[in-house]
Amino acid sequence: MKCRELAEFLADYVNQELPLESRTHFEFHLSKCKNCHEYLVQYEVTIRAGKIACDEMSDEIGAIPDDLVKAVMAARSKV
């Protein structure tokens, strides 16, 4: 596995959705490539930070009005 391929599988790896054979190749590459290992660490930190931010904002945002959702969906269908 090359570095570029590793980046393509990153989300599946973090979500534990990578098939065993691919996971084995992925983890072997991580064990040999310091840059990809650091990239994975930063990716995981970013995911955690995003979840924390969304959890904190969810109380402030509240429910989205149905008429707003319908208007957005109608506008998207015209594009």
Image (spheres, rainbow, N blue to C red):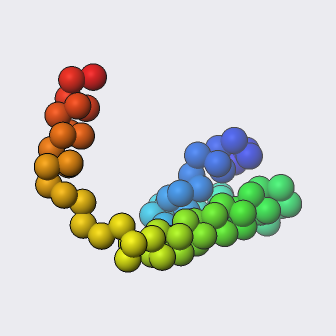
Residue 77 point in image, percent of width and height: 20, 29
Question: Residue at the location (77% across, 63% down)?
Answer: 37
In the image, is 48 to the left or to the right of 36?
left
Q: Is residue 36 visible?
A: yes
Residue furthest to the top in view is 79
Above or below 64: residue 69: above
Image quarter hosting the C terminus: top left
In the image, is 48 to the left or to the right of 69?
right
| Residue 2 position by quadrant | top right
In the image, is 73 to the left or to the right of 3?
left
- How many marks can you see? 0
In the image, is 39 to the left or to the right of 58?
right
Question: Residue at the location (53% across, 75% down)?
Answer: 52
Q: Nearer the viewer, residue 17 or 73?
A: 73
Q: Nearer the viewer, residue 14 or 77?
A: 77
Q: Nearer the viewer, residue 72 or 23?
A: 72
Residue 75 point in image, percent of width and height: 23, 31
Above or below 72: residue 31: below
Residue 38 point in image, percent of width and height: 79, 62
Q: Is residue 44 visible?
A: no
Above or below 76: residue 5: below
Residue 18 point in image, percent of width and height: 49, 61
Above or below 77: residue 36: below
Q: Nearer the viewer, residue 74 or 8?
A: 74
Question: Residue at the location (39% across, 72% down)?
Answer: 60
